[in-house]
Amino acid sequence: MTELNKIYLFRMTHIENIPHILKYGITHKNSNNCNKNYIPIGDNSIISTRNHYQLNSGKTIGDYIPFYFATRTPMLYVIQKGFNGVKPTKPEDIIYCVTSVKQILDINLNFIFTDGHANNHFTSEYSKNQINNINNILDYETINCRDWRDENDLDKKRRKEAEFLLEADLPLNNILGYICFNKAAQDKLISFGIKLNKIVIKPQHYF
């Protein structure tokens, strides 16, 4: 049986967004509790595309809060290095908020998940009632690999970016912890009021 409590979900955000998260949880852009001072770190061109890319659910990708199933994704590489017109963000300013599939199920939030990058026509979508078969749907070997460049497998990058798309805000109590790059970031998170046992320093999850 799939151990859904061990399927972790990772939401990247700028460290300056953390105080709002500590007050309202991870909020959707259309939420009543949305962060009016939200600091984005993604690729604006991709964000714009996702806001218009319709899924089988009838909603657009932008109607969901996206999570990845692993760290050190191609998107993180772009965010850190500043490609595609994206302003580079220092790794110590990027925080992973960590939850799990079980946490989402426990509070009965709606979601879909994909077997690759959501705005790709080769990607398939899966509903909540298919979650117990997730280990057979996702390519975890690729999702967890450190390198997505493979001349013998041009689809590898797409599969690595499989997504979990959450339809509603995630309450603070359902965030299991936070991953940061170094002690300076950890100290800042502590200054925001996060307990030390909720923070893990993992530079290997960055570039």
Image: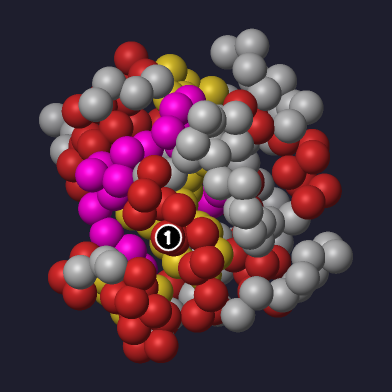
- Residue 169 in the magenta stretch? The answer is yes
Instruction: Quadrant for the C terminus, please.
Output: bottom right
Q: Residues within 10 Å of mark 1 (few under 14, many from 20)?
A: some
SS category of the residue bearing label 1: helix
Q: Position of residue 90 (x, y in %)?
A: 60, 80
Horizontal relation, residue 204 to residue 101: left or right: right
**Residue position marked by numbered label 1 in the rendering:** 19
- Is there any visible trace of residue 77 in the rendered image? yes
Residue 93 in the image: above or below residue 178: below
Residue nearest the viewer, comparing 124 with 97: 97
Q: Position of residue 118 (x, y in %)?
A: 62, 35
Residue 75 in the image: above or below residue 175: below
Would you identify the image quadrant in which residue 180 lies? bottom left
Would you identify the image quadrant in which residue 135 lies? top left
Question: Which residues make up the magenta segment?
Answer: 159-179
Residue nearest the viewer, comparing 130 with 181: 181
> Residue placed at 38% from the left, 44% from the top?
25
